[in-house]
Amino acid sequence: MSTSFFEDLSIGKDLLQAIQKMGFITPSPIQAEAIPFILDGRDIIGQAQTGTGKTAAFAIPIIEKIQPEKKYPQAIVLCPTRELAIQVSGEFQKLAKFKRSLKIVSLYGGQPIARQVRALQQSPQIIVGTPGRVQDLLNRNLLDLSSASMLVLDEADEMLNMGFRDAIERIFEYLPESRQAILFSATMPQSILTLSERYLQEPEYVYIEQEVRPIPQIQQHYLEVGRKVKTDVLVRLLKADQYRLSLIFCNTKWQVDSLAKRMKLAGFNVEALHGGMTQSKRNKAMASFRQGQAPILIATDIAARGIDVDNVEAVFNYDFPKDTEYYVHRIGRTGRAGKSGKAFTFVESSELIEFKNIQKRLKIEIIQHELPALA
Ligand code: AMP
């Protein structure tokens, strides 16, 4: 039941176009497994953690199945935290980019309820929210899920840990009898199995090995580097190994321009890419990089989003990524299409704790890299 091409899944052109724009080349294992089942209307239990592409594994088939001409909630996704709800609805927005009449609303605590009520009046088809706020809106008759045919429990183990069991059970009662339930969880404790037995019908079990790295063919390294010597270290790394194409990430446009200037002075042929540049300048920079005229591209995260270049051999996190998602996304620019790649992260001493957290979240250990000698 698994496939190695998005084109082989029964999904429409507008979704394929959005997937391509997001830079996804092939479905991740959990996507290849889960998408056909969800499209088929089956209930599923997916065991997968962050970094495996689990969000798109349910978002893609849900978007495909929504009937945009019908202006009522057709799918509800429950997430444990407001941050995850925002992230998940962001992924839905991107995947639904070319489905103009599709509306997604996120509902979570800590934001004025009136704003969310107004958003609900715009007749969204997809709702992403935390159990507390969703239940609150249901109780007040401000949200109608009586025709919602799909329900997703994302990070179900976290939701139970946070005490949302009752809220989830109440929410199920607001949905029609014949709904499709999709449960994703990183772990499978008894409480999850009990919940599934109660609410899922003949679920298909989709499992991704826990020890799988986010992108296994990428060798990940880090270097503890002081701010002032970062450029020098980068120069040494680039001289020590000649990469065909390499991508360097900075956190701001200003830093991209400033580093590009310094690298040019150091004799490297580099291009800069950030949102402050005109589209034609960006296109020119991308073309020059893609063709290898400038084998080094220095970019911000946002500008690099749509980059679909297969031969990037090394990624450098010159500036420390803002969070785990950024990390995974950045290093995923290399090691594509079955090729191997290297990723180097520069970590300042003040960033070491956050860096440990990223490794913990991804359940990986990133190896410290020796500083290459000056010669
Ligand atoms: P998730 O496990 O859903 O948190 O996704 C982790 C990251 O991988 C997100 O930044 C996704 O946008 C990205 N991603 C999801 N599916 C793919 C794919 N098939 N190829 C490349 N990146 C992906």
Image: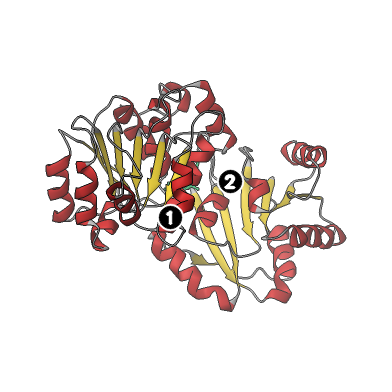
Q: Say what secondary structure mark 2 lies in.
A: loop
- Name the residue at 45% across, 22% down: 69
Is 283 left, or right, of 159 in this rendering?
right
Q: Indicate the position of residue 325 as horizontal and vertical percent values.
A: 50, 54
Q: Is residue 245 above or below residue 15?
A: below
Image-based side of 88 in relation to 288, left or right: left
User: What secondary structure is marked by label 1?
Assistant: helix
How far across and down, in percent of the image, does residue 221 sit? Answer: 54, 62
Rate crowding at label 2 as few (under 14), some (14 to 19) or many (20 or more) other CA atoms within 10 Å.
Answer: many
Left or right: 1, with 223 as reference point: left
Neighbour tally class for label 1: few under 14, some 14-19, many 20 plus, Cα within 10 Å: some
Residue at the extreme right of the image, as rendered: 265
- Looking at the image, tell me whether mark 1 or mark 2 is earlier in sequence order: 1
Query: Looking at the picture, how far across and down is residue 358, in whole percent?
Result: 46, 64
Is 267 above or below relative to 56? below
Q: Give, as a three-letter code, the residue at label 1.
A: Ile
Disc marking residue 113: 1
Residue 32 horizontal side relative to residue 294, left or right: left
Quadrant where the N terminus is found in the figure: top left
CA–CA distance in space, label 1 to label 2:
39 Å
Residue 109 placement: quadrant: bottom left
Task: State the residue in front, 109 or 2.
Answer: 109
The location of residue 87, given as percent across then percent down, is 47, 51
Q: Which residue is mark 2?
A: 333
